[in-house]
Amino acid sequence: MIKVLSFGELLWDIIAGEAHIGGAPFNLASHLAKMGIHSTYISSVGKDVLGEKALKIAKEYNLDTNYISIHSVLSTGKVDVYLNHKGHPKYTIHKDTAWDQINLNEGFRDLLFKENWFAFCFGTLAQRTESNRNLLYDLLSHLQCQYIFYDVNLRQNFYQKEWIEHSLHFSNMLKLNEEEVITLSELLLGKVVSKEQFCHTISSEYSLKIICITLGEHGSIVYDGQNFFQIPGVKVKVVDTVGAGDSYSAAFLFSFLSGLSPVESGLFASQMGAFVASQVGAVPVYSAWLKEKINTLGKFS
């Protein structure tokens, strides 16, 4: 059985007055669970209605929620999301929420350290508090994992060069979008470079095996340490792009961990990302053809 552990924010995206469960690593973990992976999530929710609802939905996705703690004081996280006319989001992320103080007791840490995980997934946003960073880096230092998947997901000004450098140091798989390539080039290399030069430099400096760069409707680039593969986009009518990148990450990991090549994994990831962009919400109900595709790919694992 393929086991994947993920860490990060669990929150509610408020879009046009409606609440949609979210958080980039949560979306990734939820898609993995829906694809049949044994997916476990580490986070925290408040002792409130939204927290209860979040746990209920997570279980409906078949997500292992044993390591999602309930904070006695801080409330479940919220994000105000504004979609422009193309369905692209802008975020206002509220501070001092439950996922800012993720907690694991020593017993839970010991259980996690004894497991053999195929992959550990995390992002940048949950690192905005020192306590979360300390917990995350402790996990990264002690977990037994074949792959460490860092999905950058920069939001507002909640990132620092030091956090990104730490994250890359632990990782061997990286996913980011083309805007984040520019930001990381400036932060880490001191200048904007081409996507190809960025991949060559970052992969050699941080021992990355796979880099995925999403390009929206134009598909993605997958770099395997030697070769660049241009993955074509899938044309759809965009409803909203919230969570599309997260679903790309999940689909790529699902395919790759099931034994498919980086190119094959990128192709399925593009299909998944396009489907999610054509739907409302970050983790929509899968279509019949998508379920069939997942069942077929799952047979490789």
Image (tube, rainbow, N blue to C red):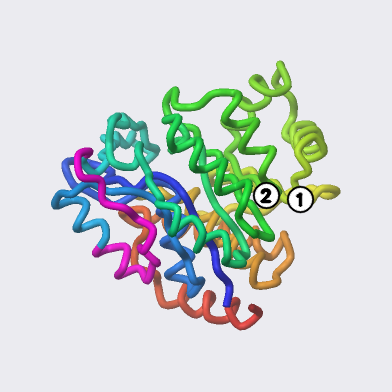
Q: What's the residue type where badge 2 is placed?
A: Met
Q: Tell me what residue is drawn at x 59 percent, y 45 percent.
A: 150
Give how far across and how far down residue 160 sits, in percent: 54, 23
Q: Which residues are magenta?
A: 56-74
Examine the image and state in which quarter residue 234 appears. bottom right
Above or below: residue 68 compared with residue 81: below
**Magenta stretch contains residue 119:** no
Locate the N terminus by quadrant: bottom right
Is there a contact, CB below 8 Å, between mark 2 and mark 1? yes
**SS for dot 1:** loop
Q: Residue furthest left?
A: 49
Residue 133 image offset from top left, x and y in percent: 49, 35
* Residue 63 covered by magenta stretch: yes
SS at mark 2 in the image: strand
Measured as percent of width and height from the top left, residue 281 is found at: 32, 53
In the image, residue 250 above or below residue 3: above
Give left or right: position of 20 versus 264.
left
**Can residue 83 be seen here?**
yes
146 and 211: which is toward the camera = 146
Q: Image point 42% across, 49% down: which residue?
A: 243
Point out the image quarter for the C terminus.
bottom right
Residue found at x 42% / y 70%: 34
Q: Nearer the viewer, residue 88 or 160?
A: 160
> What residue did someone put label 1 on?
209
Residue bearing the label numbered 2: 173
Q: Nearer the viewer, residue 107 or 9?
A: 107
Q: What residue lies at 72% left-to-right and 34% top-to-bottom?
A: 195
Kind of residue sitting beneath label 1: Lys
